[in-house]
Amino acid sequence: MAQYPPIMKDKPVFLHGGDYNPEQWMNEKDTIWKIDMEMAKKAGINTLSVGIFSWAMLEPKEGKFHFEWLDEVMDMLAENGIKAVLATPSGARPAWMAEKYPEVLRVRSDDRRELFGGRHNHCLTSPVYREKVRKINTLLAERYKDHPALGMWHVSNEYGGECHCNLCQEKFRGWLKERYSTIDKLNDSWWNTFWSHRYSSFDQIHSPSHMGESGSHGLNLAWKRFTTQQFCDFYSWEIEPLKRITPDIPCTANLMHTYPGINYFELGRLLDRSSWDNYPTWTNDMRDAGVAAHSAFCHDLMRGVCGDKPFMMMESSPSAVNWQPINRLRTPGILMLQGLQAVAHGSDTVQYFQFRKGKGSSEKFHGAVISHDNSDQNRVFQEVAQVGDALAHLTPIVGAGTENKIALIYDWENRWALDDAQFGNNINKGYEQTVDAHYCGFARAGYGVDVIDETCDLSGYSIVCGPMTYMLRPGFAERVKSFVENGGRYIATYISGWVNEEDLCFMGGFPGPLRDVLGVWDEENDAMDENQHNHFTWNGKTYEISDFCALIHAENAKIMSLLEDKFYKGYPALTENAYGKGKAYYIAGRTDEHFLKDFYGAIAREAGLLPLVEDLPYGVLCTKRVGDHGEFLFVMNTVPAENTVKLPSCTEVRSGEELGGEYTLQPYQVLALKKK
């Protein structure tokens, strides 16, 4: 049983709130701020994130600080029983800083320095920028360390991007020296004899650029690893005064699900709690089954990067956003589904962007709790209030963890290498979509899933699935072998075990160090366009293969199914290899969701794992949380149609209704059940 303390120790409830920008309303604060507090109470809002983009208001001139307005805001929040998720303002620096210290502005890969504007246009290496961030973060911590409203630190906002200035180049070269020690070792690790690209000095190395070197996969990987470490180092720099002055106040940085620019498993290890910004592209039709399944995968990934502790849905939109190609309203019921789905997967918060719509600039039409009409009678506000009421009834679930026995591997470094590799389909190898599809296979079969990367411990799981593990990072193959030897079930797919951590191919045949545990030799791989397919039959049903297909030989493995078409005919499509006390499986082609649901359901049952709910209809997902107050099952209908499920004996937490047996879920309905 996993039970964690509440995110804010003096707020042992679900946190319900959003991004609040009261400084935008300074000229109308006597009326607008009062309305905001009244509306917050009506909506069950108990937290608000403040100060996220406030640097220009906090320090309008260099060294001239104005905290008086923020003092008023913090006092106002405390008086109304609302906790502040107080931000450091480093996500957007003021114009005076860019004007006086141009070194704080980023340089693009083409060596052009950016102008002032936008967000995250700052150099993480710049001593000036670091000095300014440390100063204002220290002042914030000292000023509000004992304030009753302070509940959490929101560090910067959506870290991302990269800088190629001379300061960053020097820091990159220092990082390379530390990693490789000698230039010859770097050259050999990157296969730099190719195209006569061997360096004779670390000083000759420049970050990847289309004006220079962009085809060295070793360089590209190193730059991405360095960029991740830049953000980890900068986050640590930001929180130093916060941790020193307010050691009991947790810190987080809001993440962006599968954003490719940062390895979130590295950054997540530094967070007290992970948080992320959830913006599903709801379609308001049956396609929402796929939208919800992808959101479920992202929730579990964001929980996983911080070691499976309850996380925070830091942002979500209560209505249409303003930046998607088609900005749809939320059909009635979707807002509740969106909020409770986060809770179901381990979030202890439901937070929105934004709390109040602004009058101007690019986000004035982005969804918000309070619209331009200032009304508590519009549909969106009333649905937000309903979510607040639901969360209040779910308090016993706060802090409950998960106890999943199935793990799925999503690895950022593997993705970097795979996206850079040139073979097969060079338009999109579809790593993220593939992992997502395998996640859906388990989810639609009724199982909860943890999402981990190749560095994580496997020993606590019964089943581990590693789709397209093209790169095997140090120690991963050994952990897989130990896992299977000790009775686990491991599933691999096509394009697995091709290269090491430096993107150098394994010699002796693929899947490299996994060849003995999988019992197969992967001889060739073919790519297919949208009009080409292959087929195989398993358990009396025929399934389709598209995009990629491996031509493998079963060495020690048992063949479970054969490919049926073209010159692939007769090659294994699916294999099983007994290894120690466990088994390893190989799926030789990209299959559809129907096969993955059927296959993973069978593998899970063979491993002694029962689904949370039997025979889930399409569009229904389920997951559970377990803590001091019992086991809680969430059953979610993610489509605008009725669905009938068979429930175990349980009690609906919000209504107190006793349920069991067949139950018809209404469109987008969510049940939060306490199992008996």
Image (spheres, rainbow, N blue to C red):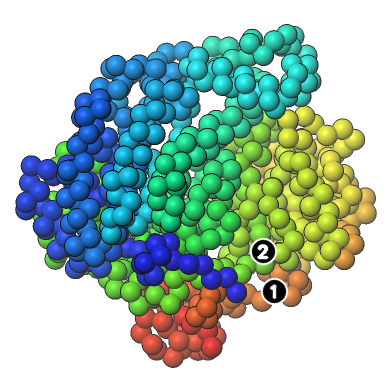
| Quarter of the figure with the C terminus | bottom right
Residue that lies at the very extreme toward the right in this rendered image: 556
Q: Image quarter for residue 624?
A: bottom right
Residue that lies at the very extreme toward the bottom in this rendered image: 658
285 horizontally vs 562: left or right: left
Whether tag 2 and tag 1 are in contact, CB under 8 A, the answer is yes
Q: Inspect the image, locate mark 1, and give the three-letter code of the amino acid beneath it.
A: Leu
Element marked by disc 2: strand
Q: Residue sitting at 24 percent across and 41 percent down?
A: 363
| Quarter of the figure with the N terminus | bottom right
Element marked by disc 1: loop
| Residue that mark 2 sits on | 406
> Which label sits on residue 152?
none
| Marks 2 and 1, how far apart at CA | 9 Å
Q: Residue sitting at 65 percent across and 42 percent down?
A: 547
Q: Is residue 122 above or below residue 452?
A: above
The residue closer to the viewer here, 2 or 325, is 2
| Residue that mark 1 sits on | 609
The residue closer to the viewer here, 24 or 327, is 24
Residue 65 position in % (x across, y down): 22, 34
Residue 641 in view: no
Residue 462 position in % (x across, y down): 73, 66
Q: Image quarter for residue 177?
A: top right
135 horizontally vs 499: left or right: left
Q: Residues within 10 Å of mark 2 (few under 14, many from 20)?
A: many
Q: Is residue 377 above or below residue 525?
A: below
35 horizontally vs 410: left or right: left
